[in-house]
Amino acid sequence: MRWSNLHTPTLRDAPADAEAASHKLLVRGGFIRQLHAGHYSLLPLGWRVFTKVESIVREEMDAIGGQEFLLPAMHPASLWKKSGRWDVMGDEMFRVTDRKGAENALGMTHEEIFTTLALEITSYKSLPQIWYQIQTKSRDEPRPKSGLLRVREFAMKDSYSFDLDQAGLDRNFALHHDAYVRIFERLGLPAVPVEASSGAMGGSGSTEFMVPSPAGEDDVVRCNSCDYAANVERSASALPVVEDRDLVELTKFPTPGVRTIAALEAADGGAPADHQIKTMVMVLDGDVTLALVRGDHQLNLQKLQDGTGAIDIRPATPEEAKAALGAMPGSLGAVGVEGTRIVADPVLQGRSGLTTGANTDDWHYTGVNIERDIAVDEWMDLRDVSEGEACISCGEPLEIVRCIEAGHIFKLGTKYAEAFGAHVMDPNGTQCPLVMGSYGIGIERNVAAIAETYHDDNGLIWPAAVAPFEAVITIVSLKDESSVVAAKALYDELKAKRIDVLLDDRDARAGVKFADAELIGIPYRITIGPRALAEGEVEFTERSNGETTRVRIDAIVDQLIAAVTS
RNA sequence: CGGGGUAUAGCGCAGCCUGGUAGCGCGCCUGCUUCGGGAGCAGGAAGUCGUAGGUUCGAAUCCUGCUACCCCGACCA
């Protein structure tokens, strides 16, 4: 490709509303343009990177025996109703009514469709199967953000495995796990597999592949001493035992103006935060539920959702809290509450001498014995793990790292097979539901994650495996005829050797060309100028470290190929 | 969904408070000079001021509705 003919509108300034490095640089470098919130056009450079990432994913899927499909993006509502997800997905699913008034869904994922196709698998002899596609997914995200990192329309490689039994699923899951490790290695992403929640997709064995980045949206709890790593939504830590205070009598005491945990610590008759119960009034699928955690802990909404199986989950309004318990937030508690579901974090189990709101404005209880005074319906892990707490497997302090979720694999089991009646005959002649797994990688998000991982003040620094071009030949001066001739010859030779090479033949000043080449992040630059050329040499510059060396012009092709393939 | 902010030329912004028919930088076009790290000079093109309505002799500017986009929050009781 000749740069003079390449549509790459590079910008000196990033759009003011861009925050994430990948967002700024992909826009500045002319890789992407926003159409509207959460929808981006990929320009030629962006598309080239996309196709390279896509190819790597495809190769690794094919390598574990995956078969590529292409399924419709729009589905009849009936399939989603059959699996129950028409309701579960809520506002996140785009719904389209056609001219006949029939309801349709834009696919967020394709379990329903692949399972329907799997109805034609009828014998255990046909198993196992791995089916996949790379296709557009539509998700009405509440808040698209950060360029390509969170969008409403994106390409995802989603694969599905079908097996006769759990052992088969475990094998296919392991195959995918290893394929994902290889994919991220080839993409240059330092992705870490972590335990995760399966969310609305349903399933178990959920493993996310997380790339550390400040632009990420997930917090990962990680141990530096052992290999424990988990999404905070799923994480655990070991806590030191808190010695209960010797307050056996349930006592109501006045706390005028006290509305927060911190204020209650300081108040007359108050208590340290780890001797308080924090009472969160939540509304789960329309019903008020009290979620109790220790005063110094934070409620994790995903844990509450996973633990209760609720679909719609939100904090109650102050008015709802008052209607349910009789007091405004700040004086709420679960002591003596009946007829309302109460769930509590196990850290509170067996505790006594606790302090909590009395459901009368400006009053609290002390001496609360949780088993005696609070009718807890269920104990479930509800709290966030904090930085520095002890690792459950080795006891060393945990750290919390912000990450981008680059891939997600999990075991679906027989949920979809049962809903759709996807059965096979086993060797004994018994009908068995297919045991399924589901595995996803977002292509654009991985492009963005690579951009987040590899850039500097001058622009992007693509790994050669995904770079839009592996090398750029920069002609310092178009006026110098021998430069032009040499550059053209080198360009033809590299193309013949199947190197992705860009020839910067624009009639621009050298500084502009150098700056643009760095901005768009081409890993290797061959600079052809009269100075070196007079001595039969060209300059070879590595984008990643900025180092420039002189190379004999007849040796440059071999050196470049060696660099690109290393 | 709650809160905040923004919308003026391809990009980044000023002008708005205090109404009088739009300006700056970058980019773009032409010419001359320049030419190894985002050139200089001269000339030039380009804007329904998000949108609908209102007030007014007159609206980018004041008022109202709508829309779009961005940021924060959606546990800290």
Image (cartoon, coloured by chain):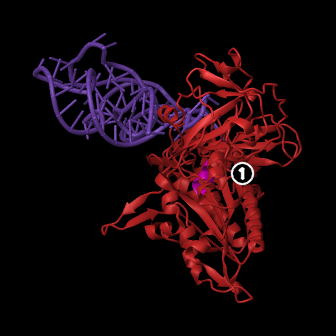
Chain colours: A red, B purple
Look at 78% across and 27% down and name the residue there. A248
Callout 1 environment at 10 Å: few (<14), some (14 to 19), or many (20+)?
Answer: many
Give the overall secondary structure of the magenta segment: helix
Give the extent of the magenta segment: A443-448
Q: Is residue A225 magenta?
A: no
Q: Is residue A528 visible?
A: no
Amino acid on which the number 1 mark rests in the picture? Leu
Look at 57% across and 44% down and name the residue there. A339
Decide: is A551 above or below A335: below
Look at 70% across and 84% down and name the residue there. A124
Q: Is residue A117 visible?
A: yes
Q: Is residue A445 magenta?
A: yes
Counting from the top left corner in percent of width and height, residue A214 is at 66, 38
Name the residue tied to disc 1.
A189
Place residue B23 in its image quadrant. top left
Look at 74% across and 39% down and name the residue there. A371
Considering the image in quadrants, where does the C terminus of chain A appear? bottom right
Closer-to-camera residue (A116/A248): A248
Closer-to-camera residue (B38/A552): B38
| Tally of numbered tags | 1
Chain bearing mark 1: A
